[in-house]
Amino acid sequence: MKKIAVVLCGSGYRDGSEIRESVAVLWALSQFPVSVQCFAPDGDQVDVVNCMTGQAVTGERRNMLIESSRIARGDVLPLKQLVTDASHYAGIVLPGGYGAAKNLCSFAFQGAQGEVRPDLKAILIDFHKAGKPIGAICIAPAILALAFKCHPLELTLGEQGDASVEIEKLGHEHFVCKADECHYDARNKIASTPAYMCEGAPLFQIFEGIRKVVERVVQ
Protein backbone atom coordinates (compact mmCIF):
# COMPACT_ATOMS: atom_id res chain seq x y z
CA MET A 1 0.00 0.00 0.00
CA LYS A 2 1.29 3.44 -0.92
CA LYS A 3 2.16 5.79 1.94
CA ILE A 4 1.42 9.51 1.57
CA ALA A 5 2.90 12.21 3.80
CA VAL A 6 0.92 15.32 4.76
CA VAL A 7 2.87 18.26 6.18
CA LEU A 8 1.10 20.51 8.70
CA CYS A 9 2.39 23.50 10.68
CA GLY A 10 -0.22 24.32 13.31
CA SER A 11 -3.97 24.67 13.52
CA GLY A 12 -5.57 27.82 12.16
CA TYR A 13 -5.50 29.69 8.88
CA ARG A 14 -3.80 32.83 10.17
CA ASP A 15 -0.83 31.27 11.94
CA GLY A 16 -0.79 27.55 11.09
CA SER A 17 -2.32 25.12 8.63
CA GLU A 18 -5.73 25.98 7.19
CA ILE A 19 -8.03 23.55 8.99
CA ARG A 20 -10.59 23.07 6.22
CA GLU A 21 -7.93 22.53 3.59
CA SER A 22 -6.12 20.05 5.81
CA VAL A 23 -9.31 18.12 6.50
CA ALA A 24 -10.12 18.15 2.78
CA VAL A 25 -6.73 16.58 2.05
CA LEU A 26 -7.33 13.83 4.61
CA TRP A 27 -10.90 13.34 3.35
CA ALA A 28 -9.73 12.99 -0.25
CA LEU A 29 -6.90 10.63 0.67
CA SER A 30 -9.34 8.42 2.59
CA GLN A 31 -11.04 7.57 -0.71
CA PHE A 32 -7.96 5.79 -2.05
CA PRO A 33 -6.13 2.62 -0.94
CA VAL A 34 -3.25 4.51 0.66
CA SER A 35 -1.97 4.97 4.19
CA VAL A 36 -1.51 8.52 5.43
CA GLN A 37 0.89 10.00 7.94
CA CYS A 38 0.86 13.62 9.09
CA PHE A 39 4.07 15.43 9.98
CA ALA A 40 4.80 18.84 11.51
CA PRO A 41 7.86 20.70 12.76
CA ASP A 42 8.49 20.26 16.48
CA GLY A 43 8.97 23.91 17.35
CA ASP A 44 7.11 27.13 18.03
CA GLN A 45 5.03 28.91 15.42
CA VAL A 46 6.45 32.20 14.17
CA ASP A 47 3.53 33.94 15.84
CA VAL A 48 0.11 33.37 17.39
CA VAL A 49 -2.80 35.20 15.78
CA ASN A 50 -6.37 35.65 16.97
CA CYS A 51 -8.37 34.23 14.08
CA MET A 52 -11.38 36.40 14.95
CA THR A 53 -9.58 39.73 14.98
CA GLY A 54 -6.49 39.03 12.90
CA GLN A 55 -4.36 40.56 15.64
CA ALA A 56 -1.15 38.97 16.90
CA VAL A 57 -1.34 37.67 20.46
CA THR A 58 1.66 38.86 22.45
CA GLY A 59 3.31 36.66 25.04
CA GLU A 60 1.80 33.41 23.75
CA ARG A 61 3.68 30.51 22.17
CA ARG A 62 2.29 27.47 20.37
CA ASN A 63 4.14 24.36 19.31
CA MET A 64 3.45 23.37 15.70
CA LEU A 65 3.57 19.64 16.38
CA ILE A 66 1.13 19.86 19.27
CA GLU A 67 -1.20 22.23 17.43
CA SER A 68 -1.16 20.01 14.33
CA SER A 69 -2.21 17.07 16.47
CA ARG A 70 -5.61 18.75 16.78
CA ILE A 71 -6.15 18.22 13.04
CA ALA A 72 -4.45 14.81 12.92
CA ARG A 73 -6.33 13.54 16.00
CA GLY A 74 -3.00 12.95 17.70
CA ASP A 75 -1.43 10.95 14.87
CA VAL A 76 1.36 13.29 13.83
CA LEU A 77 5.12 12.81 13.78
CA PRO A 78 8.00 15.32 13.92
CA LEU A 79 8.95 16.59 10.47
CA LYS A 80 12.59 15.62 11.03
CA GLN A 81 11.51 11.98 10.95
CA LEU A 82 10.35 12.40 7.35
CA VAL A 83 13.87 13.52 6.42
CA THR A 84 15.16 10.04 7.20
CA ASP A 85 12.00 8.14 6.18
CA ALA A 86 11.26 9.89 2.87
CA SER A 87 12.06 6.75 0.89
CA HIS A 88 9.11 5.01 2.55
CA TYR A 89 6.59 7.48 1.09
CA ALA A 90 5.17 7.59 -2.43
CA GLY A 91 3.94 11.19 -2.36
CA ILE A 92 3.57 14.31 -0.25
CA VAL A 93 0.86 16.95 0.17
CA LEU A 94 1.22 20.45 1.64
CA PRO A 95 -2.03 22.10 2.78
CA GLY A 96 -2.11 25.88 2.91
CA GLY A 97 -2.91 28.47 5.52
CA TYR A 98 -0.91 31.62 6.13
CA GLY A 99 1.18 29.67 8.61
CA ALA A 100 2.61 27.68 5.72
CA ALA A 101 4.09 30.91 4.36
CA LYS A 102 5.47 31.84 7.80
CA ASN A 103 6.39 28.59 9.56
CA LEU A 104 7.47 26.37 6.66
CA CYS A 105 9.18 29.16 4.74
CA SER A 106 9.63 32.93 4.93
CA PHE A 107 7.59 33.80 1.82
CA ALA A 108 5.13 35.84 3.92
CA PHE A 109 7.91 38.21 4.95
CA GLN A 110 10.43 38.08 2.11
CA GLY A 111 8.56 36.98 -1.00
CA ALA A 112 10.92 35.78 -3.71
CA GLN A 113 13.87 36.38 -1.37
CA GLY A 114 12.52 33.92 1.17
CA GLU A 115 13.85 30.51 2.14
CA VAL A 116 12.31 27.17 3.05
CA ARG A 117 12.98 25.39 6.34
CA PRO A 118 16.10 23.27 5.69
CA ASP A 119 14.42 20.02 6.76
CA LEU A 120 11.39 20.56 4.52
CA LYS A 121 13.55 21.71 1.61
CA ALA A 122 15.62 18.53 1.87
CA ILE A 123 12.42 16.45 1.89
CA LEU A 124 10.97 18.20 -1.16
CA ILE A 125 14.20 17.89 -3.13
CA ASP A 126 14.37 14.20 -2.20
CA PHE A 127 10.82 13.56 -3.41
CA HIS A 128 11.39 15.53 -6.61
CA LYS A 129 14.65 13.75 -7.45
CA ALA A 130 12.91 10.40 -6.91
CA GLY A 131 10.13 11.39 -9.31
CA LYS A 132 7.50 11.26 -6.57
CA PRO A 133 4.40 13.47 -6.87
CA ILE A 134 3.99 16.60 -4.75
CA GLY A 135 0.68 18.32 -4.01
CA ALA A 136 0.50 21.95 -2.90
CA ILE A 137 -2.62 23.83 -1.82
CA CYS A 138 -3.47 27.51 -1.36
CA ILE A 139 -0.25 29.44 -0.58
CA ALA A 140 1.83 26.23 -0.32
CA PRO A 141 2.95 26.38 -3.98
CA ALA A 142 5.08 29.35 -2.85
CA ILE A 143 7.04 26.89 -0.70
CA LEU A 144 7.83 24.88 -3.82
CA ALA A 145 8.76 28.06 -5.69
CA LEU A 146 11.37 28.83 -3.03
CA ALA A 147 12.60 25.25 -2.68
CA PHE A 148 13.25 24.99 -6.42
CA LYS A 149 14.56 28.46 -7.22
CA CYS A 150 16.83 27.14 -9.97
CA HIS A 151 14.33 24.67 -11.42
CA PRO A 152 11.32 26.23 -13.21
CA LEU A 153 7.95 24.85 -12.15
CA GLU A 154 4.34 25.29 -13.24
CA LEU A 155 2.22 26.44 -10.28
CA THR A 156 -1.06 28.11 -9.44
CA LEU A 157 -1.91 30.56 -6.68
CA GLY A 158 -5.32 31.34 -8.15
CA GLU A 159 -5.62 34.73 -9.83
CA GLN A 160 -2.70 36.90 -10.86
CA GLY A 161 -1.65 39.02 -7.90
CA ASP A 162 1.22 39.99 -5.63
CA ALA A 163 1.97 36.38 -4.65
CA SER A 164 2.05 35.12 -8.23
CA VAL A 165 4.35 37.99 -9.22
CA GLU A 166 6.82 36.90 -6.55
CA ILE A 167 7.02 33.30 -7.77
CA GLU A 168 7.35 34.51 -11.36
CA LYS A 169 10.42 36.49 -10.27
CA LEU A 170 12.01 33.11 -9.55
CA GLY A 171 11.40 31.89 -13.09
CA HIS A 172 8.33 29.79 -12.40
CA GLU A 173 5.25 29.88 -14.62
CA HIS A 174 1.98 30.86 -12.95
CA PHE A 175 -1.33 29.50 -14.17
CA VAL A 176 -4.65 31.15 -13.29
CA CYS A 177 -7.03 28.60 -11.77
CA LYS A 178 -10.37 28.64 -10.00
CA ALA A 179 -10.89 27.05 -6.59
CA ASP A 180 -12.31 23.85 -8.05
CA GLU A 181 -9.46 23.47 -10.54
CA CYS A 182 -6.03 21.91 -10.31
CA HIS A 183 -2.97 22.63 -12.40
CA TYR A 184 -0.69 19.67 -12.99
CA ASP A 185 2.94 20.14 -13.93
CA ALA A 186 3.48 16.77 -15.62
CA ARG A 187 7.22 17.25 -16.08
CA ASN A 188 7.80 17.80 -12.37
CA LYS A 189 4.84 15.77 -11.05
CA ILE A 190 3.52 18.74 -9.08
CA ALA A 191 -0.21 19.36 -8.62
CA SER A 192 -1.49 22.63 -7.17
CA THR A 193 -4.85 24.26 -6.49
CA PRO A 194 -5.63 27.74 -5.13
CA ALA A 195 -8.24 26.79 -2.50
CA TYR A 196 -8.68 29.83 -0.19
CA MET A 197 -6.39 31.96 -2.36
CA CYS A 198 -9.68 32.35 -4.24
CA GLU A 199 -11.31 34.63 -1.70
CA GLY A 200 -14.97 33.87 -1.11
CA ALA A 201 -14.91 30.51 -2.92
CA PRO A 202 -17.54 28.10 -1.56
CA LEU A 203 -16.27 25.15 0.44
CA PHE A 204 -17.47 22.52 -2.04
CA GLN A 205 -15.33 24.09 -4.77
CA ILE A 206 -12.29 24.12 -2.51
CA PHE A 207 -12.82 20.45 -1.65
CA GLU A 208 -13.15 19.64 -5.36
CA GLY A 209 -9.88 21.37 -6.23
CA ILE A 210 -8.11 19.56 -3.40
CA ARG A 211 -9.61 16.23 -4.47
CA LYS A 212 -8.11 16.77 -7.92
CA VAL A 213 -4.68 17.44 -6.40
CA VAL A 214 -4.89 14.30 -4.28
CA GLU A 215 -5.89 12.24 -7.32
CA ARG A 216 -2.70 13.35 -9.04
CA VAL A 217 -0.58 12.53 -6.01
CA VAL A 218 -1.93 9.00 -5.52
CA GLN A 219 -2.18 7.99 -9.20
Image (tube, rainbow, N blue to C red):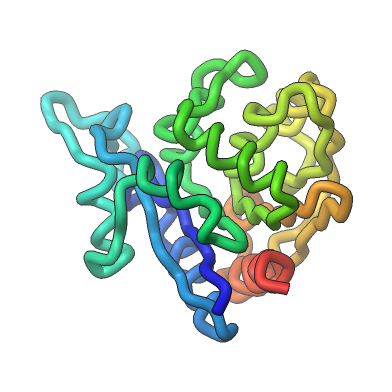
Residue 150 relative to residue 119: left or right: right
199 vs 33, nearest the viewer: 33
- On screen, residue 218 above or below 197: below
- On screen, residue 214 above or below 135: below
Q: Quadrant of the C terminus?
A: bottom right
Residue 205 in view here: no
Residue 37 in view here: yes
User: At which x and y percent is residue 159?
Assistant: 77, 44
User: At which x and y percent is residue 199?
Assistant: 61, 51
155 vs 7, nearest the viewer: 7
User: Which residue: 53% across, 27% down?
Assistant: 116
Q: Quadrant of residue 189?
A: bottom right
User: Which residue: 71% across, 30% down?
Assistant: 148
Q: Quadrant of residue 204?
A: bottom right
- On screen, residue 82 above or below 5: above
Residue 30 relative to residue 210: left or right: left
User: Which residue: 36% across, 40% down?
Assistant: 80
In this view, which residue lies farthest toward the left? 59
203 vs 209, nearest the viewer: 209
User: Which residue: 70% across, 27% down?
Assistant: 162
Q: Quadrant of the N terminus?
A: bottom right
User: At which x and y percent is residue 10?
Assistant: 32, 47
Residue 216 relative to residue 172: left or right: left
User: At which x and y percent is residue 44?
Assistant: 24, 33
